[in-house]
Image: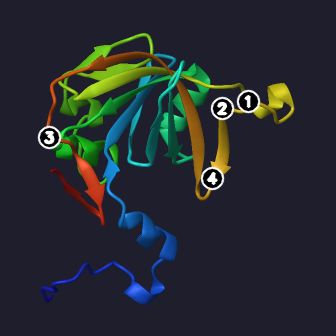
């Protein structure tokens, strides 16, 4: 066995997706989206997030279509978008399923049950949201709340409630690493 300075499973730079490399150059906020379906909690770390102000406001995100969160959100129609601070790095990794979380990622922090799903106690902010639109099967492909986008699913959530917490140093993801400013 030898020790290498580079990541052993990372493809050579010439073999990496140019779109993924472009995305990696952008600083992205780190959030954890949570939902409850039939009494079961689900959550996922999401950095592909945009907040659109308005009346109502919206949160737009790109989710893994195979995630438990997407299943729970589609079934329940509601979610909480939790904005993480620098001190939540390990929580972000637990919900990103890249770090161990004995007993599941929800055991890694304190959560407040809301009508939209679990809200992180001590979050920088959180929003209680409803899935915008209805499934295509019910409307004949008009006014969807989601659509396939790249390798994910683009989801529009209508913001119904916000809680603003302490102004924490933000957790930002860029080039595969967390940082703050």
Q: Which residue is mark 4?
A: 149
Residue 39 seen by the camera? yes
Q: Which residue is mark 2?
A: 145
Could you tell me which residue is drawn at 38 percent across and 85 percent down? Answer: 13
Q: Residues within 10 Å of mark 2 (few under 14, many from 20)?
A: many
- Of marks 2 and 3, which one's residue comes earlier in the chain? 2
Could you tell me which residue is drawn at 52 percent across and 38 percent down? Answer: 60
- Of marks 4 and 3, which one's residue comes earlier in the chain? 4
Q: In what quadrant of the picture does the N terminus appear?
A: bottom left
Q: Tag on residue 169?
A: 3
* Gap between marks 1 and 4 measured at Cα: 16 Å
- Between 58 and 89, the one nearer to me in the picture: 58
Q: Which residue is mark 1?
A: 135
Look at the numbered discs 2 and 1 and tell me whether their residues touch, using CB distance below 8 Å.
Answer: yes
- Of marks 2 and 1, which one's residue comes earlier in the chain? 1
* Gap between marks 2 and 3 measured at Cα: 32 Å
Look at the numbered discs 4 and 3 and tell me whether their residues touch, using CB distance below 8 Å.
Answer: no
Of the two numbered discs 1 and 4 in the rendering, the one whose residue sits closer to the viewer:
4
Where is residue 153 shown, x and y percent of the image?
60, 46
The reply, left or right, for residue 66 in relation to residue 42 is right
């Amino acid at each position: 066995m030898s020790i290498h300075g580079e990541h052993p499973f990372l493809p050579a730079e010439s073999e990496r997706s140019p779109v993924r490399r472009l995305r990696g150059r952008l600083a992205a906020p780190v959030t954890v989206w949570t939902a409850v379906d039939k009494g079961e909690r689900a959550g996922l770390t999401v950095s592909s997030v945009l907040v659109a102000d308005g009346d109502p406001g919206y949160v737009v995100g790109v989710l893994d279509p195979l995630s438990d969160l997407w299943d729970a959100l589609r079934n329940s129609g509601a979610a909480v978008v939790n904005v993480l601070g620098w001190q939540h790095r390990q929580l972000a990794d637990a919900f990103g399923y890249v770090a161990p979380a004995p007993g599941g990622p929800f055991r890694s922090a304190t959560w407040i049950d809301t009508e939209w799903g679990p809200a992180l106690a001590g979050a920088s902010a959180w929003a209680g949201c409803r899935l915008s639109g209805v499934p295509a099967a019910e409307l004949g492909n008009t006014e969807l709340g989601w659509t396939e986008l790249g390798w994910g699913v683009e989801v529009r959530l209508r913001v119904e409630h916000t809680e603003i917490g302490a102004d924490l140093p933000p957790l930002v993801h860029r080039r595969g690493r967390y940082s703050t400013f």
